[in-house]
Image: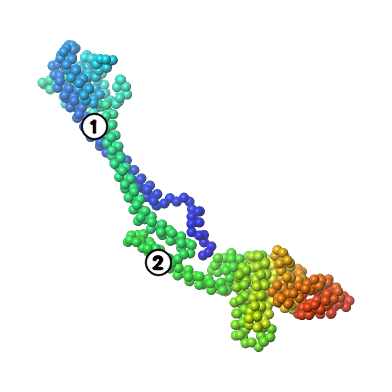
């Protein structure tokens, strides 16, 4: 569970969020925009119809008023005589007054001459000149073409009725002005239409009315939309987003390995049901995780997690037969040999109890410096360090000193020996489908065990190969060491120097070894060159100074045996166990 990436560091790798609040907002605006456009379109069309009808009736009433100011007989007379008498002028002035006092664009009376032509009888629109009222645009007798812009007027003439609807004209002669026209007939007593009154209204008036109504409606709807949106945001935030954020935070905690906590269940909706399910799921996962942790701890008693890590596995369940990897590692082989005297007489239970007591004090020292115990073999133990070689040396010294401290408290005299090597180790899984084990195979593991066996014969508690020593910076300055001999690895056939690290020895032993170091190392070097006579002299000098130096005694014994040998080249000079 440790390897999972924590919380919302994950969040750093996620893309920009497009949250529910934004989705609700976009959905709301989309729906409201559709509703608004639809409402504005239909109400705009309705307003146009209503306003169109309103202004049409208004224009017709003006036309009817204008039509009442002149009779059919007068129209016929003006049409025939084309004489502008005082009565004509009075009527024209009245029409102009109506045109000025109302918001119409044009007011005129036309008498049709044929289906395509008509004659202006009155035109209330006039041109202003400086300081004067000005002249009318069209005068009595001016001919006008009754083209397609007068279709509704023709209908009025034919039927003798008011116009049914506005007639729209896009352009007129004095500019680009959109106008709407309504008409009223001037009838004889027999109901024959002799002329029609035209009232033109600037269509912008209609548009302004529609626009004003639309703007009012738009403002009202925007205000309502804003209110609804704020209400929706509050509802969504309180009833949806806040519970979801709580669930999100809760799920993140679960991702980080925090289980068992409960969220408060509020309400009786779907989110409260989901919250309740989350709570139950968290409890269930917590129970399973606790069980897995117990199982993992139990498995780690047999297969260290560090070994799984070396094999690239997160869990023992991922172990596969044949999995293997090569790693540079430092190997520490240690053997507890019990008490010097009396151990043979001890029964099995006492020995087991003593072993467990020693292991309980030793294994923590190995783990403290980043090592892990690979396996046990009787009273021997093999530990592996995939970090710094110096950590293995520090563990070994700590183990030796810890045992010495226990001896001082209990009065027991117990022996321990340690060998340290460094090199490539093959870690792998062997066995059968239903019974597998992790192994560490290397010539260096065998060498470490061999050094551990040699150590007691040479009066040493800790032996290390030169290749391992060279991995440690300032090795010879940091530790008390002496060159103790040469050894040949029977697997690699490589010859290596072996050093005795005596930092863990008693003060008396450490001082003796340090005092005779130079003479002892000279003796060993001469021994390795098979100069047994000269070597013998060095070891004699060492023993005169330190009488109980086991290594010097061992070498002196061999020198005494071979210093008179005629063929010294055949004499083995490597360290050996017997």
Label 2 or label 1, whichever lies nearer to me, is 2
Confirm whether residue 299 shows in the render. yes
Q: Position of residue 396 (x, y in %)?
A: 66, 72
Confirm whether residue 326 shows in the render. no
Q: Identify the residue at image location x=30%, y=42%.
A: 221
Label 2 secondary element: helix
Q: Nearer the viewer, residue 161 or 533?
A: 533
Label 1 secondary element: helix
Task: Decide if residue 239 is on the left or right side of residue 533.
Answer: left
Task: Decide if residue 338 is on the left or right side of residue 40.
Answer: right
Q: Position of residue 544 (x, y in %)?
A: 81, 79
Q: Position of residue 281 (x, y in %)?
A: 42, 65
> Would you call the spot at circle 1 few (<14 residues within 10 Å), some (14-19), or many (20 or more)?
many
Q: Identify the residue at image location x=76%, y=75%.
A: 512
Residue lying furthest left: 189
- Which residue, given by chain and number where applicable, does mark 1 sit on? 52
Using the numbered discs, state the Cα–Cα distance from disc 2 to disc 1 in whole angstroms: 68 Å
Question: To which quarter of the image does residue 488 belong?
Answer: bottom right
- Which residue, given by chain and number where applicable, does mark 2 sit on? 280
Q: Position of residue 252 (x, y in %)?
A: 46, 60
């Amino acid at each position: 569970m440790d390897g999972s990436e924590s919380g919302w560091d994950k969040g750093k790798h996620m893309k920009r969020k497009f949250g529910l609040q934004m989705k609700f907002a976009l959905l709301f605006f989309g729906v409201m925009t559709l509703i608004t456009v639809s409402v504005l379109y239909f109400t705009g069309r309705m307003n146009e119809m209503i306003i169109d009808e309103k202004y049409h009736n208004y224009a017709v009433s003006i036309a009817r008023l204008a039509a009442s100011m002149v009779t059919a007989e007068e129209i016929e007379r003006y049409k025939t005589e084309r004489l502008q008498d005082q009565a004509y002028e009075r009527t024209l002035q009245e029409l102009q007054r109506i045109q000025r006092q109302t918001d119409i664009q044009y007011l005129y009376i036309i008498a049709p001459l044929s289906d395509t032509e008509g004659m202006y009888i009155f035109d209330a629109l006039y041109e202003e000149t400086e300081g004067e009222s000005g002249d009318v645009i069209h005068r009595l007798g001016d001919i006008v073409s009754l083209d397609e812009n007068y279709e509704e007027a023709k209908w009025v003439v034919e039927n003798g009725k008011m116009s049914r609807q506005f007639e729209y004209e896009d352009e007129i002669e004095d500019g680009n002005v959109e106008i709407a026209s309504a008409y009223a007939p001037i009838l004889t007593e027999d109901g024959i239409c002799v002329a029609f009154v035209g009232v033109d209204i600037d269509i912008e008036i209609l548009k302004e009315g529609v626009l004003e109504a639309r703007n009012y409606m738009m403002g009202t709807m925007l205000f309502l939309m804003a209110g609804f949106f704020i209400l929706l945001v509050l509802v969504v935030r309180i009833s949806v987003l806040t519970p979801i954020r709580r669930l999100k935070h809760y799920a993140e905690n679960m991702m980080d390995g925090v289980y068992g906590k409960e969220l408060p269940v509020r309400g009786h909706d779907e989110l409260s049901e989901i919250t309740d399910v989350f709570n139950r799921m968290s409890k269930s996962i917590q129970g399973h995780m606790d069980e897995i942790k117990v199982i993992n701890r139990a498995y780690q008693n047999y297969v260290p997690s560090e070994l799984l890590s070396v094999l690239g596995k997160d869990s023992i369940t991922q172990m596969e037969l044949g999995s293997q990897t090569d790693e540079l590692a430092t190997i520490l082989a240690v053997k507890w040999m019990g008490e010097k005297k009396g151990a043979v007489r001890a029964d099995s239970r006492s020995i087991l109890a003593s072993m467990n007591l020693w292991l309980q004090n030793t294994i923590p020292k190995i783990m403290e410096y980043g090592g892990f115990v690979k396996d046990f073999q009787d009273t021997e133990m093999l530990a592996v360090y995939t970090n710094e070689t110096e950590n293995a040396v520090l563990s070994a010294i700590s183990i030796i000193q810890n045992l010495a401290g226990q001896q001082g408290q209990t009065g027991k005299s117990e022996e321990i020996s340690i060998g340290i090597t460094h090199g490539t180790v093959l870690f792998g899984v062997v066995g059968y489908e239903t019974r597998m084990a992790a192994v560490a195979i290397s010539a260096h593991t065998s060498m470490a065990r061999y050094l551990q066996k040699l150590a007691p014969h040479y009066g040493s508690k800790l032996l290390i190969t030169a290749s391992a020593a060279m991995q440690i910076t300032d090795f010879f300055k940091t530790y008390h060491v002496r060159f103790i001999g040469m050894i040949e690895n029977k697997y690699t056939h490589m010859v290596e120097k072996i050093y005795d690290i005596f930092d863990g020895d008693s003060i008396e032993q450490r001082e003796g070894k340090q005092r005779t170091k130079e003479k002892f190392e000279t003796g060993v070097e001469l021994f390795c060159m098979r100069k047994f006579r000269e070597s013998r002299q060095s070891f004699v000098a060492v023993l005169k100074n330190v009488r109980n130096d086991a290594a010097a005694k061992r070498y002196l014994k061999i020198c005494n045996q071979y210093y008179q040998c005629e063929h010294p080249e055949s004499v083995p000079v490597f360290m050996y166990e017997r």
